[in-house]
Image: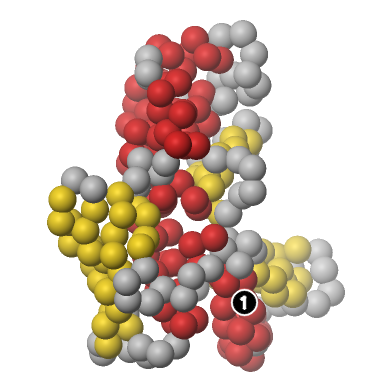
Amino acid sequence: MEYNIVVTRKRIKNMIIRITRDGEVRVSVPVGVSEKSVSDFIVSRKGWIEKNLVRTLRGLRNSRKNFETGDRIRILGKIYTLQVMMSNENKVELEERDADGGDLFLSVSMYNDTDIRRIVLYDWLKDKLFHLLAELTKKYGDLTGYYPKEIKIREMKSLWGSCNVRTKKITYNFTLIEKPLKAVEYVVLHEISHMPYPDHQEGFWEFVSRFMPDWKKRKKLLSDS
């Protein structure tokens, strides 16, 4: 199983591991601890990490299905029929059938392991969304002149995105992977627009309208699709 590990040195006595809601493994270590000690610690906790990582991913919205052949998966407003296949490697491939969708082929080495199917597909969906968001961030950054220092993805209950104006970091809701491209573009511009306008104060919507005159229609797609 592949996963990201972020090591942070702090003024603490013991090494601590936690898993974030978006599936990132964070390790806090005392300032003076050697790299080898940190590495050995992480290796010793590998079983715990993977067990709890699977448990975390089970709670994510796109991991609530068993992901079996015939399941319908929504990706960027289109519907894809899942085809699960046995393979020597874990991979995901899209085959467009028409403008409304097509087939989504999920190849896994452990066909009957529901958790493996969930994790492989979730990782692929998250990667696909991240690359799209990165492209759109550059597109609307070039248009507006504002760029975040970092973008992240996690599941959020009530927000499509949030912008931390102080740190210039934007966090997007993982559920955006299901929404049409035009709706995703709206969310990206909306969050970037908070950099010059932290709140929905006077001037915010004028700024959004300047670069996306049809933003109201795009916003409506978030609830209609």
Indicate the quadrant where residue 213 lies: top left
Q: Position of residue 16 (x, y in %)?
A: 74, 74
Q: Residue at x 15, y 50 (%)?
A: 98
Q: Residue at x 41, y 50 (%)?
A: 178
Mark 1: give few (<14), some (14-19) or many (20+) Cα within 10 Å: few
Q: In this image, 133 relative to 194: left or right?
A: left
Q: Amino acid at mark 1?
A: Arg
Q: Is residue 1 visible?
A: no
Out of 192 and 181, give the one closest to the viewer. Answer: 181
Q: Position of residue 114 (x, y in %)?
A: 46, 83
Indicate the quadrant where residue 13 lies: bottom right
Q: In this image, 5 relative to 1: left or right?
A: right
Q: In this image, 72 relative to 22: left or right?
A: left
Q: Please give the residue where the numbered disc 1 appears in the rendered image.
A: 55
Out of 134 and 172, give the one closest to the viewer. Answer: 172
Indicate the quadrant where residue 38 lies: bottom right
Q: Position of residue 1 (x, y in %)?
A: 46, 82
Q: Is 215 situated above or below 132? A: above
Q: Position of residue 225 (x, y in %)?
A: 42, 41
Q: Is 199 situated above or below 45? A: above
Q: Secondary structure at mark 1?
A: helix
Q: Is 200 situated above or below 104? A: above
Q: Residue at x 35, y 22 (%)?
A: 143
The residue lying furthest to the front in this view is 70
The residue lying furthest to the left in this view is 97
Q: Residue at x 41, y 23 (%)?
A: 217
Out of 157 and 189, give the one closest to the viewer. Answer: 157
Q: Is residue 217 visible?
A: yes
